[in-house]
């Protein structure tokens, strides 16, 4: 990359360009997870589609390894790369709501908080994840699970179209009616196929939900989680709920059940009774709240600047022995910032066939996540070992499958399990749209083979 090349690139670029010596470079290369520290040669913070095309042309002409940054919340740091180019979409975060059709168009760098803020004005919501600073880009391309999943499905089940700039800098629309192979692949195939400059979603009428936290002392954890499991097996689609093993603000170990009921509030009060009456919660914070409030409950649990390492596993069932193992493992936590989350999906998401989108794991409703979070980098090995050994402990119960977007830095064989039986079809579509594997700083589907890296 010559001085002349970069000068020409800068002069034709509308957004911001950062190189190592530039003011703002260090801020621009930060992401939420402090364990990730990468030094790109150029960060191109795009202002729109024309900038994305200019950045892609520049990256290709100079043979630069190229990463795509959406919300910067991929745990393994796939938003960045060392010595290459980062196409940074963080300025492209506009959200347009069509109240009549209840369709929402979102730029590729928007966060979930950006979307909830705009859609709530119209009494609408797009099914996505549960932490406001997460990017809609990486989340949707990985599937997208959250509080509305059982009623309205995953984010990809609500995706109507996407505008994408492919590796040869073409601007392409992918939908059920245009480039439907690409549309299929974008719904669970990760960032392999190009830069998604905007997503169009079907939103739903969700304004106020019945939700919040039920907290119990940790000694009750096995009973509480067993009851939660049995109760969710009979729950209506309007109810999505997770359980978590965490610590209170004073450091006391707790178990939480977190329901979100998105139907009629009076019905919800009745339906949630068995959950709220079980055991003796030390706190029942469940109430009717605006949906964005529900969405922001867990924001403070994931502050910028902590070190993070995640391990997770999808399971068909959650037997008693797995519950006991998870609780024992949580009791060995060595950081009050770490936690275990037991997420239960199913409902509308589970009724979509495994071949309908690139996300194959429709029949595995349990996702158990070991989320290690700490502040002292010298303690990294201890915390990583805790998360790893949690996932290893669950192997006898696991389906050897993973949610793509929950994967940290993983070995090739683990990434393959996220694509599962859909990998050969993904590889064929990758070959069509990105034969040179230009987009490879991701959960990569290798061109020309059925392997993933
Ligand atoms: C605190 C936290 C909470 C989370 N909660 C949930 C949750 O509730 N539900 C859930 O489903 N997931 C959740 N996740 C996982 C999350 O979906 C993934 O980490 C996802 O990658 C985040 O997207 P991002 O745009 O912020 O990622 P980034 O780190 O910016 O990007 C990750 C990768 O996604 C691709 N990418 C991102 N944007 C684009 C784009 N516009 N075009 C093409 N490729 C793109 C690129 O390959 C990039 O390497 C959570 C993660 C964190 C850290």
Image (cartoon, rainbow, N blue to C red):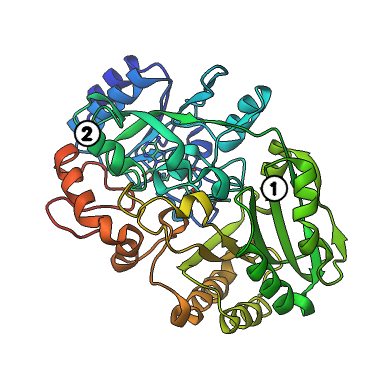
Which percent across, then down, holds residue 115?
A: 58, 30
Compared to residue 377, the image places residue 269 above or below, namely above
Secondary structure category for the residue under label 1: strand
Which residue is label 2 attached to? 167
Q: Residues within 10 Å of mark 2 (few under 14, many from 20)?
A: many
> Would residue 208 appear left or right of 420 to someone viewing this image?
right
Q: Residue at x 22, y 29 (%)?
A: 2
Is residue 251 in sight in this rendering?
no
Can you say which quadrant of the picture contains the N terminus? Answer: top left
- Residue 166 appears in the picture as rendered: yes
Specify the quadrant that holds the C terminus: bottom left
Which SS class for mark 2?
A: loop
Mark closer to the chain start, 1 or 2: 2
Query: Can you tell me whether the CB of the residue at mark 2 lies under 8 Å from the nearest atom of ligand 1?
Result: no
Seen in the image, is 151 located left or right of residue 56?
right
Residue under the image location 51 percent in, 79 percent down = 389
- From mark 1 to mark 2, how far is it between C-alphas? 42 Å
Asked if residue 184 is positioned above or below residue 406 in the image, the reply reads: above
**Position of residue 288 measured from the top left corner of the image (x, y, whole percent):** 80, 42
Is 124 rendered above or below residue 41?
above
Q: Is residue 400 above or below residue 240?
A: below
Report the residue at 55% width, 60% height from top.
308
Of residues 367 and 380, which is closer to you in this image?
367
Q: Which mark is residue 2?
A: none
- The residue lying furthest to the left in this view is 448
Camera-nearest label, 1 or 2: 1
Residue 341: x and y in percent read: 61, 64
Q: Label 1: few (<14), some or many (≥20) within 10 Å?
A: many
Report whether 344 appears left or right of 439: right
Q: Is residue 256 left or right of residue 234?
A: right
Q: Quadrant of residue 321?
A: bottom right
Name the residue carrying label 1. 261
């Amino acid at each position: 990359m010559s001085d002349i090349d970069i000068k020409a690139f800068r002069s034709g670029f509308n957004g911001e360009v950062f190189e190592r010596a530039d003011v703002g470079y260090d801020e621009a290369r930060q992401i939420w997870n402090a364990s990730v520290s990468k030094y790109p040669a150029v960060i191109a913070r795009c202002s729109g589609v024309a900038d994305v095309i200019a950045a892609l042309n520049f990256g290709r002409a100079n043979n630069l390894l190229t990463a795509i940054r959406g919300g910067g919340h991929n745990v393994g740091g796939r938003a960045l790369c060392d010595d290459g180019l980062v196409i940074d979409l963080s300025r492209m975060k506009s959200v347009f709501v069509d109240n009549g059709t209840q369709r929402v168009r979102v730029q590729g760098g928007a966060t979930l908080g950006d979307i909830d803020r705009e859609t709530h004005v119209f009494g609408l919501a797009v099914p996505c994840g549960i932490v406001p600073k997460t990017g809609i880009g990486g989340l949707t391309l990985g599937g997208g699970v959250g509080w509305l999943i059982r009623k309205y499905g995953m984010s990809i089940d609500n995706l109507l179209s996407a505008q994408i700039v492919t590796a040869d800098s073409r601007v392409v629309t992918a939908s059920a009616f245009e480039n439907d192979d690409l549309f299929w692949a974008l719904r669970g195939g990760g960032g392999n196929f190009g830069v998604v400059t905007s997503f169009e979603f079907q939103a739903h009428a969700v304004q106020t939900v019945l939700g919040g936290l039920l907290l119990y002392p940790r000694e009750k954890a096995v009973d509480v989680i067993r009851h939660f499991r049995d109760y969710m097996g009979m729950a209506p689609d309007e109810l999505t709920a997770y359980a978590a093993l965490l610590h209170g603000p004073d450091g006391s170990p707790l178990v939480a059940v977190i329901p979100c009921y998105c139907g009629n509030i009076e019905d919800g009060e009745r339906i949630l009774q068995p959950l709220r009456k079980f055991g003796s919660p030390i706190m029942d914070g469940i109430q009717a709240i605006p949906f964005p409030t529900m969405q922001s409950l867990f924001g403070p649990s994931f502050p910028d600047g902590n070190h993070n390492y995640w391990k997770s596993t999808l399971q068909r069932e959650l037997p008693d022995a797995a519950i006991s193992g998870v609780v024992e493992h949580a009791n060995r936590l060595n950081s009050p910032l770490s936690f275990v989350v037991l997420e239960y999906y199913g409902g509308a998401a589970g009724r979509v066939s495994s071949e309908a989108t690139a996300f194959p794991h429709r029949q595995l409703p349990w996702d158990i996540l070991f989320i290690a979070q700490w502040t002292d980098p010298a303690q990294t090995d201890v915390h990583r070992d805790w998360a790893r050994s949690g996932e290893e402990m669950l192997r006898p119960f696991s389906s050897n499958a993973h949610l793509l977007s929950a994967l940290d830095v993983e070995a090739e064989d683990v990434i393959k399990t996220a694509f599962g039986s859909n990998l050969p079809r993904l590889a064929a579509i990758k070959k069509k749209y990105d034969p040179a594997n230009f987009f490879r700083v991701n959960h990569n589907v290798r061109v020309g083979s059925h392997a993933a890296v």
